[in-house]
Image: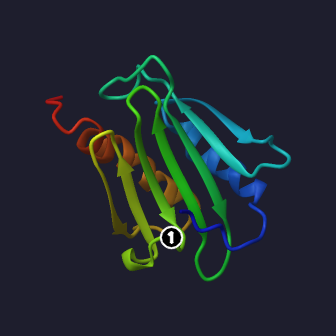
Amino acid sequence: MSVPHPGGDPNANLYAQLKRDVLDRVPQIMAVEYVPDDVEAKQLRAFFDPDRLDPPTGPDSPKLTIKWYRQDPHDWFRINYTDPNTGFHAGWHQDEDHPDLGLAHLQYATDDEEDRWGISFEHVTPSMVLWEIVEELLNEVRPTHQYPNDSS
């Protein structure tokens, strides 16, 4: 079950900043779109080139979906990675779904297992938090949890 965001509208300007400052600079990402469009942006969706990921996946493009609401004292966000080729899912959530894990948590699921644990971020600005998440996804989460027995 998912706890709904606490209210307010997402900030389309924030999404433009996240797209420009982070997603457009990640070489593994081949396209980014506003959902439903750039005027009413309620989320961002980034598509990975399956051949640029290490290890590669394919043929379908994995995606990263970002929902972010600016609010005090803490922003609410959900950043979810899904690989349609393997069924792997990872999500970084700062919400109230799992208060026992703290302010934010990381969760993942494969066909065989799932897990979640509390996390914290080195930075507080949205662009820097998103950088941390993308780096963790590419350097740690995919290799460790999506391909745990891969020797690459």
Residue picked out by circle 1: 97
Q: Position of residue 70 (x, y in %)?
A: 68, 69
Please tell me which residue lies in front, 119 or 100: 100
Residue 9 place in picture, x, y as percent: 78, 64
Furthest-right residue in this view = 39
Location of residue 121 by image quarter: bottom left
Q: Is residue 9 left or right of residue 139?
A: right
For residue 17, side relative to residue 97 (left or right): right
Residue at 44% of width from left, 72% of height from top? 98
Q: Position of residue 143 (x, y in %)?
A: 26, 39
The C terminus, quarter of image? top left
Residue in the image at 58% along x and 45% along y: 65
Write the residue at 49% across / 21% down. 60
* Left or right placement of residue 95 versus residue 100 in this view: right
Q: Nearer the viewer, residue 146 or 111?
A: 111
Q: Position of residue 117 (x, y in %)?
A: 33, 65
Determine the image quadrant of residue 19.
Answer: top right
The answer to whether residue 65 is left or right of residue 150 is right
Compare residues 134 and 24 and report the one nearer the observer: 134
Instruction: Tell me the amino acid under the disc marked 1.
Output: Asp
Query: Please, what secondary structure does the residue beneath circle 1 have?
Result: loop
In the rendered image of this protein, does residue 89 appear above or below residue 132?
Answer: above
- Is residue 46 positioned above or below 90 on the image? above
26, above or below 73, in the image: above
Toward the top, the furthest residue is 59
Q: Judge the density around disc 1: few (<14), some (14-19), many (≥20) Cα neighbours within 10 Å.
A: some
